[in-house]
């Protein structure tokens, strides 16, 4: 018997370095990139790191970040959703028409708009799985078609304003009181610490290897400090925006679902090797359809958040570069385009990078032509790091 | 005991299997050999439910059974490891072992239960993997093959079919996998190994069954047979019938 060969020992610093060398970089390149971006823009413009600007940044990233979360769901399967931008715009328009023109209850209007988005996702998923159309083509048709429906619904006017003090606009103009923000920070940190302790105990009881204690506590402390830092900065301005909390909650919930449920496990399995998943008895078609439904629903919700922030919908809703930014954010955050690899935190980190660049360039009054080129360079760099890392870990 | 008697299968004008018979007993490793097109794969597919033979019978412990789908085969305790292994390289060893049959409660994964059971299973098979939580992509070819074979044992099968288990492996890894096959025998499983490599066949099997052009072309006790006799049966130089 060689029980000891099966035991997972914590990584010693030396092994950690070996792991890094092998290309198992995790989120560290993105975090490093963020620090570099903060340093560069911080020195070029004193407003960039101000509490006010960082609060704006948090508000700006929620909508596109939510769309990016949906993109990750399909990227995990090795598919793509090009229609996310159009679907987000359409969903926002549907919600606005029901709410403003038909005087629906705003919550009901949002719910129906999300249901419509889910139906669109179902249609995409069925076209992809039943008619065997490549997801690229299905969602390219969606990109054009749903944009067309959006223009048709908006009609001649082209713009519908949302009441400034209405429920939808308030979504992006609500700020958590300081006590609530700090309670949240404490609850999240304590929750994570408690779950870490419980898991450690259970693993030890089951005679399974546990990671070194200092690593666990370092992580909990790191999370606590990061959250406390964010709340301190945001409190110096208007407070923690509700929009950021909503986006953060979505990231956490999706991450838990992907890591701890059968659906999540099977999603990664289908993305890694669809044939193996099929032979293992997994209903591959159902997983694929569900991913498209989730992608479209999250895109729709992102559209609602964007409308809330603008307090209006118009012909440009969900248009221009929103889709490309959402895809770029997912990829920059470390989601593989080839499926099976990536976590919802990728959307958070990726959108932070992209929005920081956009925001910093706007502060510096740089022309949008330059902004696009810089964003493109960052995207190319992220994919290059990912490809090289994979080359290093491949055998 | 699994018995195949007189099964035939035609694909259009091609007679893939012609009155083929095969007995598989618990605690015995049987090697199925033959040239390309001899009907080895078709026979395995009939046992694992991928195809239904035109005529003939399959019996388990004396009673006749019908294997029409892979699920039927699974229910009868037949587990097949295909040559391409069918592992998800992005998932870790534990996830691959339990893929499709995860321990769960209300669809929440039972991580600890699966990890402990996976560790115990691999330990009992003496499969050495330093960290069973790393993605399968990081394992060597022999380790991957071992994981695929271990996965075949999750459903507590009675018959394990291995399709070319050593085809892609180096010398040392081949030895590891052959050891693993011996351990399956010690567990009292019936094992059917398809192989092109006669050295491996001689090293691990108790009995060799030769197919040639879709028919039985000889059956040998491995220990009492020379490699030349097996080669002769494969190529058709002579025919041994029992």
Image (tube, rainbow, N blue to C red):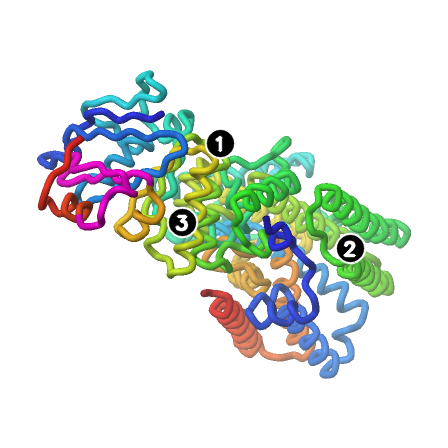
Over which residues does the magenta segment extend? B206-228
Question: Mark 1 — residue?
Answer: B156
**Secondary element at tag 3:** helix
Chain letter for mark 2, please.
A
- Does mark 2 fall on the same chain as mark 3? no
Q: Residue at x 51, y 45 (%)?
A: B96
Q: Secondary structure at mark 1?
A: loop
Residue at the front extreme of this rendering: B224
In the picture as drawn, the residue positioned furthest to the top comes out as: B63
Residue A241's label in the rendered image is: 2
The residue at which mark 3 appears reads as: B178
Q: x and y percent of residue A83 in the render? A: 47, 52
- For disc 3, the chain is B
* Spatial separation of the CA atoms under disc 3 and disc 1: 20 Å
| Total numbered badges shown on the rendered structure | 3
Q: Residue at x 77, y 57 (%)?
A: A216
B214 drawn magenta: yes
Name the image quarter holding the C terminus of chain A: bottom left
Nearest to viewer (mark 3 / mark 1): 3
Residue A105 visible, this orientation: yes
**Residue A120 visible:** no
């Amino acid at each position: 018997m060689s029980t000891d060969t099966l035991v997972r020992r914590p990584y010693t610093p030396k092994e950690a370095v070996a792991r890094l060398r092998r290309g198992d970089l995790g989120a560290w390149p993105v975090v490093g990139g963020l620090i570099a971006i903060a340093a560069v823009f911080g020195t070029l413009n004193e407003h960039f790191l101000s509490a006010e600007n960082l609060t704006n940044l948090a508000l700006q990233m929620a909508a596109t970040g939510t769309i990016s979360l949906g993109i990750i769901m399909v990227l995990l399967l090795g598919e793509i959703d090009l229609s996310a931008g159009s679907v987000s715009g359409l969903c926002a328009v549907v919600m606005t028409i029901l709410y403003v023109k038909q005087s629906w209850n705003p919550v009901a209007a949002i719910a129906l708009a999300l249901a419509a988005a889910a139906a669109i996702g179902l249609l995409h998923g069925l076209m992809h799985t039943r008619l065997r159309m490549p997801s690229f083509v299905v969602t390219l048709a969606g990109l054009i078609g749903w944009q067309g429906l959006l223009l048709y619904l908006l009609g001649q006017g082209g713009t519908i304003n949302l009441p400034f003090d209405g429920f939808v606009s308030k979504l992006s103009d609500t700020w958590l009181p300081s006590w609530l923000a700090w309670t949240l920070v404490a609850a999240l940190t304590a929750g994570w610490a408690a779950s870490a302790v419980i898991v450690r105990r259970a693993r030890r009881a089951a005679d399974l290897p546990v990671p070194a204690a200092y690593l666990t506590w370092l992580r909990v402390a790191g999370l606590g400090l990061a959250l406390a830092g964010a709340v301190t900065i945001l409190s110096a301005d208007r407070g923690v925006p509700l929009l950021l909390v909503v986006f953060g909650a979505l990231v956490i919930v999706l991450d838990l679902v992907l890591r701890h449920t059968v659906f999540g496990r099977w999603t990664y399995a289908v993305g890694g090797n669809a044939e193996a998943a099929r032979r293992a008895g997994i209903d591959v078609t159902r997983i694929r359809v569900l991913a498209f439904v989730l992608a479209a629903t999250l895109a729709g919700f992102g559209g609602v958040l964007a409308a809330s922030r603008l307090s209006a919908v118009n012909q440009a809703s969900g248009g221009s570069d929103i889709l490309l930014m959402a895809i770029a954010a997912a990829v920059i955050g470390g989601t593989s385009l080839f499926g099976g690899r990536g976590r919802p935190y990728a959307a958070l980190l990726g959108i932070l990078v992209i929005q920081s660049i956009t925001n910093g360039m706007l502060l510096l009054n740089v022309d949008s032509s330059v902004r696009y080129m810089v964003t493109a360079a960052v995207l190319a760099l992220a994919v290059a790091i990912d490809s090289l890392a994979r080359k290093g870990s491949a055998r | 005991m699994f018995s195949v008697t007189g099964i035939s299968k035609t694909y259009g004008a091609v007679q893939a299997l012609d009155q083929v018979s095969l007995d598989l007993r618990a605690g015995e490793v049987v090697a199925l050999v033959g040239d390309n097109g001899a009907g080895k794969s078709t026979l395995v597919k009939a046992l694992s439910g991928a195809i239904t033979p035109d005529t003939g019978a399959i019996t388990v412990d004396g009673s006749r059974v019908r294997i029409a789908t892979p699920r039927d085969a699974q229910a009868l305790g037949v587990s097949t490891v295909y040559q391409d292994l069918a592992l998800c390289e992005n998932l870790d060893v534990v996830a691959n072992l339990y893929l499709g049959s995860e321990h769960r409660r209300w669809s929440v994964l039972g991580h600890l239960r699966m990890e402990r059971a996976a560790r115990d299973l691999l330990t009992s098979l003496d499969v050495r993997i330093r960290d069973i939580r790393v993605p399968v992509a990081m394992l060597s070819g022999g380790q991957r093959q071992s994981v695929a074979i271990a996965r075949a044992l999750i459903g507590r099968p009675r018959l394990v079919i291995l399709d070319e288990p050593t085809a892609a492996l180096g010398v040392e890894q081949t030895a590891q996998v052959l050891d693993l096959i011996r351990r399956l025998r010690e567990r009292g499983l019936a094992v059917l190994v398809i192989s092109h490599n006669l050295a491996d066949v001689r090293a691990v099997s108790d009995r060799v069954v030769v197919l040639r052009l879709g028919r039985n072309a000889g059956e040998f006790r491995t220990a009492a047979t020379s490699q030349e006799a097996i080669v002769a049966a494969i190529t058709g130089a002579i025919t041994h019938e029992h």
